[in-house]
Amino acid sequence: MPEVPQPAAQQWNIPPELYNQFAGMHFQQMPVNEDMRAMEYFNKFKRVSFSGREDVNDFIQAIETRTRVGFTDYQKIYVVELSLEGAALDWFRQEISANMRMMMWDQFRERFVNRFMPVAMRNSLRWQFLQIKKGNRSVNEYTDEFYRLAHKVPDVMANDAWAAHVYVTGLGE
């Protein structure tokens, strides 16, 4: 049974024994739902935040890493909401909040990246990805660079055959 701090019981002029008895009953009856379990798990990680000025791909990757196991699409989007600040939170409340329970993670991620990554940067990253060459690097270095860029252009990576083509073509040059 959880012990309630003395000041809380005094604040309402309730004898501590009675307050603790009531609080213990109340907490025992509270259901532990999946959203609460997911949030407890997520809170074990170092908090990430996003205001709109940080690297959107790094933020999304941090969220996906932390919510990979056991999180529903809604829970992932909720975790994003809890991590947002400033203009990013304002955008979320205006554009996403009302429909977030019905939204799939991939739909959300696409809208989020489209909003917070400038078009010029997306195009530049796509171009870098499509032009990647092994050159003088080892296969491991080339592969690391391939995946680093691929992480930043997930729309290109959605087609496995195309991604494999880009990888193999870059290996030969």
Image: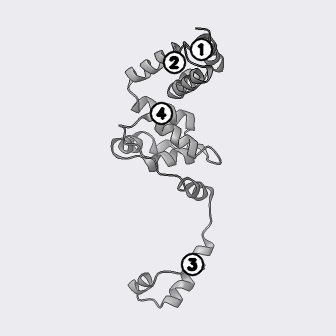
User: What residue is disc 2 on?
Assistant: 129
Q: Quadrant of the N terminus?
A: bottom right
Q: Quadrant of the C terminus?
A: top right
C-beta proximity under 8 Å, tags 4 and 2: no
User: What residue is disc 1 on?
Assistant: 166
Q: Earlier in the sequence, mark 2 or mark 1?
A: 2
Looking at numbered disc 2 in the image, what kind of residue is underneath it? Phe
Looking at numbered disc 4 in the image, what kind of residue is underneath it? Asn
Check residue 2 in the rendering and tell me which mark sits there, or answer none: 3
In percent of width and height, residue 158 lies at 60, 24
For label 1, the crowd category at 10 Å Cα-Cα, with few meaning under 14, some 14 to 19 and many 20 or more, is some
User: What residue is disc 4 on?
Assistant: 57
Cα distance, mark 4 to mark 2? 15 Å
In the image as oriented, which residue stretches furthest toward the left? 86
Looking at numbered disc 3 in the image, what kind of residue is underneath it? Pro
C-beta proximity under 8 Å, tags 2 and 1: yes
C-beta proximity under 8 Å, tags 2 and 3: no
Looking at numbered disc 1 in the image, what kind of residue is underneath it? Val
Q: Secondary structure at mark 4?
A: helix
